Amino acid sequence: MNKLFGTDGIRGVANQELTPELALRIGRAGALVLGKGSRCRLLIGRDPRISGQMLEGALAAGIASAGVDVISVGVVPTPAVAYLTQKLDCCGGAMISASHNPLQDNGIKFFGADGHKLADSREAEIEALIPQDNHPRPTAGGVGRIHFKPEAVNLYLGDLRKRLPLNLRGLKIALDCAHGATAQYAPKL
């Protein structure tokens, strides 16, 4: 198998190179490395690409199959995943996005519990587990749960408001978020 992790996570054409089956394996491997066998929580966010929901479902299933709980925050900017991973005391985070790449692409990027991008060595640990399918699989109450918490983004927005105490009332501002995840939140700031 070719190297999966590039300079900013795993990317490819959604449903061809980055398939739901691969996303499930990535989720399970990520949970095994970041969760280290504990019952922790891994946060997932995504950008608004159509393929994001499909990949999120598969990624979350893989994480839960390893006994790690999932907090899904829905469509959020990548920095929100980094912030919320740390703020909500998660063992890691994952962002489903291909950033500026073409619409048909998508990607998965992991963050550590500190909200920082994983070191190459941690990504290599995850990548080594992806092709294996002999991991222990919990049953019954040992399976991770998936929680949908889109309101968690308000913690991130509140922090941004504190950091940027500008009063922009009365000003007309043009902002082009290019249909990205920030588009729905920028007017609230």
Image (spheres, helix red, strand yellow):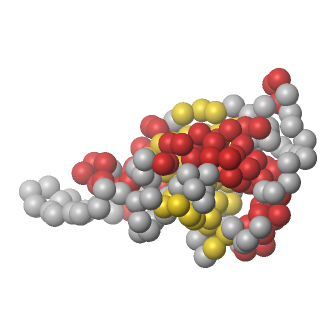
Residue at 77%, 53% (x, y): give it: 29
Q: Is residue 159 visible?
A: no
Q: Position of residue 150 (x, y in %)?
A: 47, 38
In the figure, is residue 155 to the left or right of 22?
left
Quarter containing the N terminus:
bottom right
Residue at 20%, 59% (x, y): give it: 167
Examine the rendered structure and indicate whether residue 133 appears above or below residue 112.
above
Examine the rendered structure and indicate whether residue 44 appears above or below residue 102.
above
Foreground residue among 151 and 147: 147
Q: Name the quadrant containing residue 77.
A: bottom left
Q: Residue furthest top?
A: 140
Q: Position of residue 79 (x, y in %)?
A: 48, 61
Examine the rendered structure and indicate whether residue 169 appears above or below residue 20.
below
In the figure, is residue 182 to the left or right of 96?
left
In the figure, is residue 30 to the left or right of 167?
right
Residue at 72%, 43% (x, y): give it: 62
Q: How many marks?
A: 0
In the figure, is residue 21 to the left or right of 128?
left
Q: Residue furthest front?
A: 16
Q: Position of residue 159 (x, y in %)?
A: 43, 54
Q: Is residue 113 visible?
A: yes
Q: Position of residue 102 (x, y in %)?
A: 41, 65
